[in-house]
Amino acid sequence: MLDLHPGLMVFVLVLFFALIYQLDLKLYKPLMKFMDDRDANIAKNLKAAGSLSDDGEEMLSRAKANIDEAKAKAASMRQEAIEELKASNAEAFEKRQRELEEEYEKFLAGLEEEREALKGTVLSQLPLIKESLKAKFNQI
């Protein structure tokens, strides 16, 4: 049947504890150290990422402020350009209006001269017209 060998049992027990001790030294302690280092590294990286996120948000807010400032400056520049164009257009309009008024005055003066010339021509031709009309009436 089954024989028990106490010496063999003690030897297996000692061998088991020796293997456990060697596994602890060569496997478990380095594995636990690696896992602790990894956890510390992850915590450090999370902290760094949090600070980078804060820096990123700060940079984003500064960029938005710069964009808003640039938009405001562009709007003011556009408004100034519009005002300058309105002023120059108003000057050009007034100048052209004065030129047109002067041309109109010259036209009216020329028209008045033509009227006077025509009136003089008609008055000088009035005796001929009267005689021509008398001749026509006489023919009737």
Image: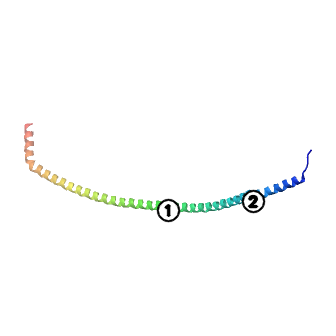
Frontmost residue, 13 versus 79: 13
Against 134, residue 108 (above or below) is below
The extreme top residue here reads: 140
Residue drawn at x 36%, y 59% as measured from the top left: 85
Horizontal relation, residue 46 to residue 118: left or right: right
Residue 61 position within the rendered picture, expressed as x and y whole percent measured from the top left: 55, 61
Residue drawn at x 70%, y 58% as measured from the top left: 35
Residue 91 position within the rendered picture, expressed as x and y whole percent measured from the top left: 31, 60
Q: Secondary structure at mark 1?
A: helix
Which residue in the structure is indicated by mark 1?
66
Residue drawn at x 28%, y 57% as measured from the top left: 96
Q: Quadrant of the N terminus?
A: top right
Q: Amino acid at mark 1?
A: Asn
Horizontal relation, residue 100 to residue 63: left or right: left
Q: Which corner quadrant of the image does residue 93 belong to?
A: bottom left
Horizontal relation, residue 41 to residue 129: left or right: right
Measure the alpha-carbon separation of dots 2 and 1: 59 Å
Q: Amino acid at mark 2?
A: Leu
Q: Which corner quadrant of the image does residue 99 belong to?
A: bottom left
Which residue in the structure is indicated by mark 2?
25
Q: Residues within 10 Å of mark 2 (few under 14, many from 20)?
A: few
